[in-house]
Amino acid sequence: MSQSTWDAVDAYFADHLIPTDPALDAALATSEQAGLPAIAVSAGQGKLLNLLTRIAGASSVLEIGTLGGYSTIWLGKALPAGGTLVSLESDAKHAEVARGNVARAGLADVVDIRVGPALDTLPGLRDLAPFDLVFIDADKPNNPHYLNWALELTGIGSVIIVDNVVRGGSVADSGSTDAAVRGVRELTELIENEPRLDATALQTVGSKGYDGFAIALVTG
Ligand code: SAM
């Protein structure tokens, strides 16, 4: 299987299952124009986040890693009236682009984008806890810290989703010195040893290449 096959299959399912959304298309276009890296989730992955948020009945979401707000919009559109989403972003330019995109999507009153390293902004969220769903998609070496914060800021029944856990397959390399790989492996071992979490991880292929998600349910 090749990247071109994965692209074609993603396009096929997107054509049939994911209606065109001008706000999402504009978010990608303005992000590209502003020079942001093309590392947002794919349309299919964004729709998965949207569906998981609705399946969980989530009304409060925390995202770590906003970029241009593409996944933020997918998550925000899943919320019921009165729902809230806090998204944390360290790069002021990314946050500015994201705010424009979120406003264009009609979600300015729903989404609160906070600028700064997430480890600095997370402690300020205690008053907003518990979050029903947390999406972790920022700097991978800090994944273990983000998981611990997600545990602190959620409750029984909350869902924690972590993106990019496969690292091109390197996650299976116990000797890897790559900080991102080590971050994912440490995160996995934290989940393994955390009695309050029940989880799985799925490998994915598609327009974003070969990667995967971890999904955990807070059970205790
Ligand atoms: N979730 C976005 C989407 O799918 O549209 C993609 C997020 S991108 C993979 C990761 C983002 O995390 C980047 O915008 C980066 O600037 C941000 N980031 C990196 N380190 C961070 C940190 N320490 N705190 C908060 N955000 C950080």
Image: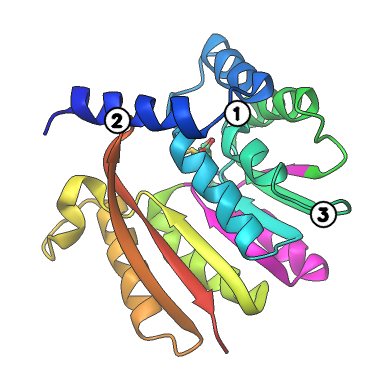
Task: Read off the residue under disc 1.
Answer: 68
Distance between the alpha carbons at the discs numbered 2 and 3 = 33 Å
Q: Mark 2 points at which residue?
A: 9
Farthest front residue in view? 16
Q: Is residue 24 visible?
A: yes
x%, y% of residue 97? Answer: 67, 23
Left or right of 115? Residue 142 is left
Distance from the alpha carbon under mark 1 to that under mark 3: 21 Å
Q: Which residue is at a point 51% across and 86% down the rendered structure image?
A: 196
Q: Are marks 2 and 3 in contact (CB under 8 Å)?
A: no
Crowding around mark 1 (Cα neighbors within 10 Å: few <14, some 14 to 19, many 20+) is: many
- Whether the residue carrying mark 1 lies under 8 Å from ligand 1 is answered with yes
The answer to whether 93 appears left or right of 184 in the picture is: right
Q: Residue furthest top?
A: 33
Q: Report the residue marked by disc 3.
A: 83
Q: Residues within 10 Å of mark 2 (few under 14, many from 20)?
A: some
| Magenta highlight on residue 148 | no
**Alpha-carbon neighbours of circle 3 within 10 Å: few (<14), some, or many (≥20)?**
some
> Which region is colored magenta?
112-138
Task: Give the foreground label among 1 and 2.
Answer: 2
